[in-house]
Amino acid sequence: MRADRLVAVLLTLQARGRVTAAQLADELEVSVATARRDLEALSAAGIPVYPQTGRGGGWQLLGGARTDLSGLSSGEARALFLLVGPAASVAPEAKAALRKLVRALPETFRTHAEAAAEAVVIDPGEWGRPAPERPELLPVLESAVVDRVRLRIRYAAWRAEPVDRTVDPWGLVQKQEHWYLLGGVDGAERTYRVDRMLDAVPTGEQAERPDGLDLAEVWERVTAAVDRQRSAATATIVVDSGIVPLLHTQFGQRAVAETQLDAGRSRVVVTAPTEVLIARGLAGWAEYLDVVEPESIRRELHRLGTALVARNAPAAEGERSPDSAPAVPT
């Protein structure tokens, strides 16, 4: 429809400042003659769109004129403000941008958009724990990603000495309280946890980014690789069915209920990076479960139980525990 195309023409002018009819035709996939007629139609309708002849000429909005025409439907505007509204409560820049977006909407949409922006509050903290602070280096990383600038980072992996790396930053991911930088090092995909970065400095060089990169797909590969690493050890247990949801909370997706058995019991498979971690995770539910296999985890649970009994046996009457304070004389 021509009306939709005229909206696209106007938004293109606002975004790019000045365009030629040929550039606009290529952008909208129409003929040069059609693009020129659309520009002339906007001018005839009273929108200050004027051509400039000569070298470097083209069509532009006079004086950088703007319009409140956004091209958004009411539903699209509501969805947008439900998404960006929560961010405005934590970032002053987002709050300012939100106000400008509201003013850019048609007046009939503004009330619903403002209501949508205030409808959701996100509290990233857990009960009993303060909300995690944004990593100090996050603004540097955000700028490098957006500006496509290469970074020199100093990174200390878990139980490893710090190393220096030159990274092409592709994007950032927040998963629960942790932030991750996805990028390339010598053409290979790499992932860095932001809170383990000791320093990050832009080099000023243009970062390389693969054509057609889909950040969500990259992150899916990362999470799949992490899940494989965390599933190196496996145990099959029979447990009271009421405990299965608690095992899901403790082991996450690595606790899979295979079979519902009789008498309120379930067969469950749990996985973790090591058998020791599985045993330690199951030890708190020992009275409700039986390990079917492997035998090595049964032995580890037995060892843990023996150690608990040895170190935490009730004191005999008249004795006091090693760490108890002496009695106060009366």
Image (tube, helix red, strand yellow):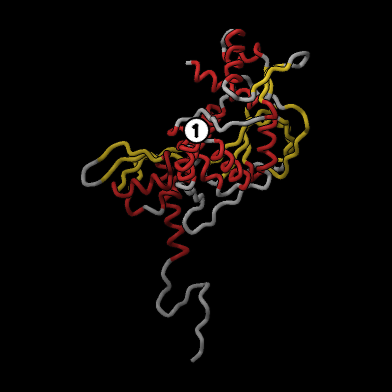
Residue 172 x %, y %: 60, 36
Q: Which residue is mark 1?
A: 228
Vertical order, 264 against 221 (above or below): below
Q: From this viewpoint, is residue 87 visible? A: yes
Disc 1 crowd rating (10 Å Cα; few below 14, some 14-19, many 20+) is: few
Query: Which residue is at a point 28% across and 46% down the rendered structure image?
Result: 241
Vertical order, 325 against 215 (above or below): below
Q: Nearer the viewer, residue 216 or 226?
A: 216
Report the amino acid beneath label 1.
Answer: Arg
Query: Which residue is at a point 29% across and 49% down the rendered structure image?
Result: 242
Residue 138 x %, y %: 65, 43
Vertical order, 274 against 287 (above or below): above
Query: Which residue is at a point 47% across and 56% down the rendered structure image?
Result: 127
Q: Nearer the viewer, residue 188 or 199?
A: 199
Vertical order, 187 against 281 (above or below): above
Image position of 21 (left or right of 98): right
